[in-house]
Amino acid sequence: MFDVPKKNIHLAQIANHKQHAIAQVAQALINAGYVTPDYLIGMQKRENQASTYLGNGIAIPHGTVETRHNVLQTGVQVFQFPQGIDWDNGHKAYIVIGIAAKSEEHLTLLRQLTHILSDENIAKRLATTTSIDTIYNILLAQESIDDFIFNASMISLDVDTDHIMTLQALNINHLQDANAIDNDFIVDVITNPPLYLGQGIWLSDSKKGNLKTAMAIARPKEPLSYQDHQLCLLITLSCKDNLANNTLNHLANLLIDKKIAKLLQASDAVQVFSLLTTETNEEKETLSVEFTLNNKHGLHARPSSQLVNTIKKFNSKVTITNLDGSGIPANGHNIMSVIGLVARQNHRIQFKISGPDAQATLHAIEQVISANMDEEIA
């Protein structure tokens, strides 16, 4: 984990414009002994090349590769601007994190920010809090932040069984491993039959013992006969809040549109996860393509930035999935989401592209990937 000393967190700062804020952050880096005074020039040059605004009110100004020699030691300074600063085409930054990195140590910090960039409520807390401890705990993910626990690892496919209890046991094990349920939940779901949703889909949940919001899925190799219906897929849901609503809405849409067959025929857990978490637009302009990363360091900060900046030139929606990672699709327009894929060399990444210029977007992505994002290959 990348640590940020509390003395490096500055509350209730004021800046008239972006360059003023960058100058303040740079001076703090200089005062802390992280960089030489010339590092400010690199930060300004980097900002002129491409905005360092990440989303949800957060910006991360930093120097260029050419000014890395001005970094004396890796460190960061965190500035809170409660009034907000116009940072990028009307997007306001409320938290500005100045980064000085001798190599790639700061990538850990960037990945720690992923949970903030996907939750507007957390970002608002950072912008308005008067507590350094709150910012410290949220930035380092030490404060309890509820998330919906559901990914490809929570999905069991082609289970060789003829009894529902095997499926339920698999799901319960996943929820236990996630610390999402207690014994009251287990007893309740084992004692009471699941709810039939239709088209072979069953849902098991409980009003008791929900510690976190999480979901596990088990699909038998062959449909089971259960209570005069087929059981083709069992969902076990622990629900502490409404964080699962979007996924449940996707499931409802599949049921309404009679597209459950896609869920039951999906060849792997990543496909099942994608069907339940992303829009299932099957129009002709929706393209899907898979690449294997050849560049030495995978999708770390610089290649991720190049890829995202390429995608932003077009109007199409792009999602990126690391097929050898969590299987969670990332927004191709958000650099932190892309960095959060933790895609390494030789990992397979899948792009899904939909929109008016999908083909042109795909062609541009292909060029960037083919050039290994201007990085060497091992």
Image (spheres, rainbow, N blue to C red):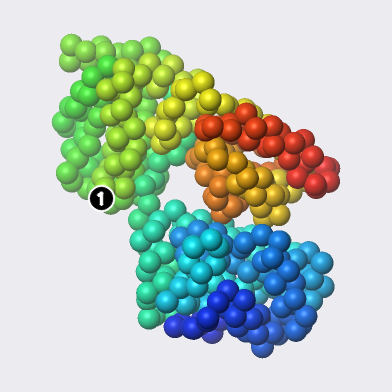
Q: Residue at x 61, y 63 (%)?
A: 52
Coordinates of residue 280 in the picture (x, y in percent):
42, 28
Q: Quadrant of the C terminus?
A: top right
- Whether residue 357 is situated above or below residue 78 in the rendered picture: above
Comparing 80 with 179, the one in front is 80
Comparing 170 with 6, the one in front is 6
- Whether residue 6 is situated above or below residue 264 in the rendered picture: below
Q: Residues within 10 Å of mark 1 (few under 14, many from 20)?
A: some
Dividing the picture into quarters, in which one does residue 353 lie? top right
For the question of whether residue 101 can be seen, the reply is no
Dividing the picture into quarters, in which one does residue 143 lie? bottom left
For the question of whether residue 57 can be seen, the reply is yes
Report whether 279 appears left or right of 378: left
Q: Quadrant of the N terminus?
A: bottom right
SS type, badge 1: loop
- Whether residue 76 is situated above or below residue 373 in the rendered picture: below
Q: Residue at x 44, y 53 (%)?
A: 118
Q: State how many labels appear.
A: 1
Which amino acid lies under the numbered mark 1 shown in the image of this protein? Answer: Asp
- Whether residue 51 is situated above or below residue 164 in the rendered picture: below
Report whether 124 appears left or right of 320: left
Give the residue furthest to the bottom. Answer: 31
Q: Residue at x 48, y 83 (%)?
A: 13
Coordinates of residue 212 in the picture (x, y in percent):
31, 50
Coordinates of residue 206 in the picture (x, y in percent):
19, 40
Coordinates of residue 360 in the picture (x, y in percent):
65, 32
Dividing the picture into quarters, in which one does residue 332 lie? top right
Q: Residue at x 71, y 61 (%)?
A: 49
Report whether 133 appears left or right of 313: left
- Residue, disc 1: 241
